């Protein structure tokens, strides 16, 4: 199976036809350079309203000291490191707890875990609108010339937390786009580094 020209050897196993199952350990999760998100979602317009409505329902009427469970919430985000994952879902589990803000109002605190899930299948977008033009061209090339079987990629759970005063999870970092070599010099073309996965939760 051929390889696209990615910058980092860590990405090569993602293209192996022998990896029908793959689990990302913590250092590999860091290499994805996940776009910063919070429990309220908001990465993509196509699911933003649904994610935010779910969050609002979860905190509606929450009292100080009250705890509510968050079970298997799928939240859309994306990889900024080209050749790792694409746009993908994370699965969130944990608890929302009502807390007192400094002004005496009721706020919230989330503590739990995040797990990455992406389906690698190099699926061309028939409308050509889901990816930046360069990423879509790479997907179409891979779909035509790289022979293999699509597979799920999962990660180990990562501990995360967030409060009502924080826009994203505590482990979020400033977004940094890392392009593949064929995209060098045109990094402004990409919102994320996607060249692979489907937009579907597991």
Image (tube, rainbow, N blue to C red):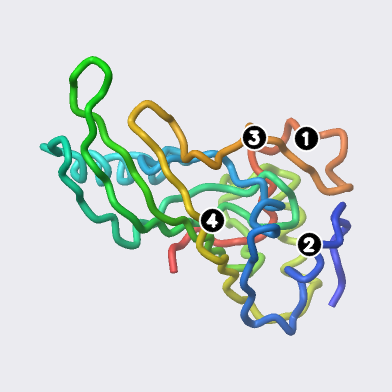
Q: Which is nearer the eye, 144 or 36?
A: 36
Which residue is labeled 3 in the image? 175
Which residue is labeled 4 in the image? 88
Q: Residue at x 57, y 45 (%)?
A: 129
Instruction: Estimate the spatial distance between the alpha carbons at disc 2 and disc 1, rounded to whole Å.
Output: 18 Å
Q: Are marks 1 and 3 in contact (CB under 8 Å)?
A: no
Labels 1, 3: front one = 3
Q: Are marks 2 and 3 in contact (CB under 8 Å)?
A: no
Q: Quadrant of residue 191?
A: top right
Q: What is the number of the mark on residue 11? A: 2
Q: Relative to 49, is 125 above or below?
A: below
Labels 4, 3: front one = 3
Q: Residue at x 19, y 28 (%)?
A: 106
Tag 2 secondary structure: helix
124 with respect to 43 (left or right):
right
Q: Earlier in the sequence, mark 1 or mark 4?
A: 4
Q: Earlier in the sequence, mark 4 or mark 3?
A: 4
Residue 6: % across, % down: 85, 55
Q: Quadrant of residue 41?
A: top left
- Quarter of the picture containing the N terminus is bottom right
Q: Residue at x 23, y 15 (%)?
A: 103
Outermost top residue: 103
Instruction: Estimate the spatial distance between the alpha carbons at disc 4 and disc 3, rounded to whole Å.
Output: 16 Å
Which residue is labeled 1 in the image? 187
Q: Earlier in the sequence, mark 2 or mark 1?
A: 2
Instruction: Estimate the spatial distance between the alpha carbons at disc 4 and disc 2, rounded to whole Å.
Output: 16 Å
Residue 168: % across, % down: 46, 36
Q: What is the number of the mark on residue 13? A: none
Tag 4 secondary structure: strand
């Amino acid at each position: 199976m051929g390889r696209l020209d990615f910058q980092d050897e860590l990405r090569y196993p993602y293209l192996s036809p022998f990896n029908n199952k793959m689990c990302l350990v913590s250092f590999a999760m860091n290499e994805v350079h996940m776009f910063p998100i919070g429990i309220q979602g908001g990465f993509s317009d196509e699911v933003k309203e649904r994610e935010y409505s779910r969050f609002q329902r979860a905190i509606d009427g929450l009292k100080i000291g009250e705890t509510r469970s968050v079970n298997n919430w799928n939240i859309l985000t994306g990889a900024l490191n080209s050749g790792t994952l694409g746009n993908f879902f994370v699965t969130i589990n944990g608890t929302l707890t009502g807390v007192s803000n400094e002004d005496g109002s009721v706020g919230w605190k989330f503590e739990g875990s995040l797990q990455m899930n992406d389906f690698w299948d190099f699926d061309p977008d028939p409308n050509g609108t889901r990816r930046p033009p360069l990423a879509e061209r790479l997907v179409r090339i891979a779909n035509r010339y790289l022979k293999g079987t699509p597979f799920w990629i999962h990660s180990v759970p990562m501990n995360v937390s967030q409060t009502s005063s924080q826009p994203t999870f505590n482990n979020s970092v400033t977004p940094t786009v890392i392009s593949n070599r064929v995209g060098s010099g045109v990094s402004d073309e990409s919102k994320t580094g996607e060249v692979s996965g489907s937009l579907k939760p597991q």
